Amino acid sequence: MGLFGPSKKQKLASGPISPPARNARYLRQAVGSIPDYDDVATDSIRRAGVDPGSVDYPVLSAAIGIVARSQLGEWARRSPGLGADLDIVMNRPDFSAQLLADFLLGQESATAVAIHNRYAEIMCNQIPEEFASTLRQGQYLNS
């Protein structure tokens, strides 16, 4: 605990993360929204053109989460100042796309908005396309 209550790290690890103010300076530069892993899985299945009933959905969604969190971790390591806080948020038990977006867009930093925008872009395009390709090859299908 900090001198005047919970430390910043304690708040990030378990406290509420509020959405950014509507008039936040950098909020206007945010592009797109970050989909949840399940939404990316659904998009991957649609792009692959496979029968949704034939897909091991929990395994696919978990694999998407591993790839996505790996990319976030890489950006955290390259972002002095923001990186340590991003790592704390990523490791919360209640981590979600909305929590991440609220954290990044609430930072009022160009780096945080750039990470938000790039992450939203890969979660909406690159990752679903990569997983659609693996689905077409027969991976993540029920046995």
Image (cartoon, grey):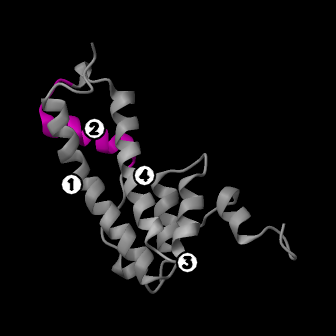
Q: Secondary structure at mark 3?
A: loop
Mark 4 vs mark 2: which is more N-terminal?
2
Q: Residue at x 30, y 39 (%)?
A: 41
The answer to whether residue 117 is left or right of residue 110 is left
Residue 20 seen in render: no
Question: Label 3 sits on what residue type?
Answer: Gly
Secondary structure mostly seen in the magenta stretch: helix
Q: Residue at x 17, y 24 (%)?
A: 138
Q: Which mark is residue 69?
A: 4
Q: Which mark is residue 44?
A: none
* 100 lies above or below 56: below
Question: Label 4 sits on what residue type?
Answer: Arg
The mark closer to the camera, 1 or 3, is 3
Q: Which residue is mark 1?
A: 125
Q: Position of residue 85 (x, y in %)?
A: 58, 68
* 42 lies above or below 3: above
Is residue 53 located in the magenta-colored stretch of the structure? no
Q: Secondary structure at mark 4?
A: helix
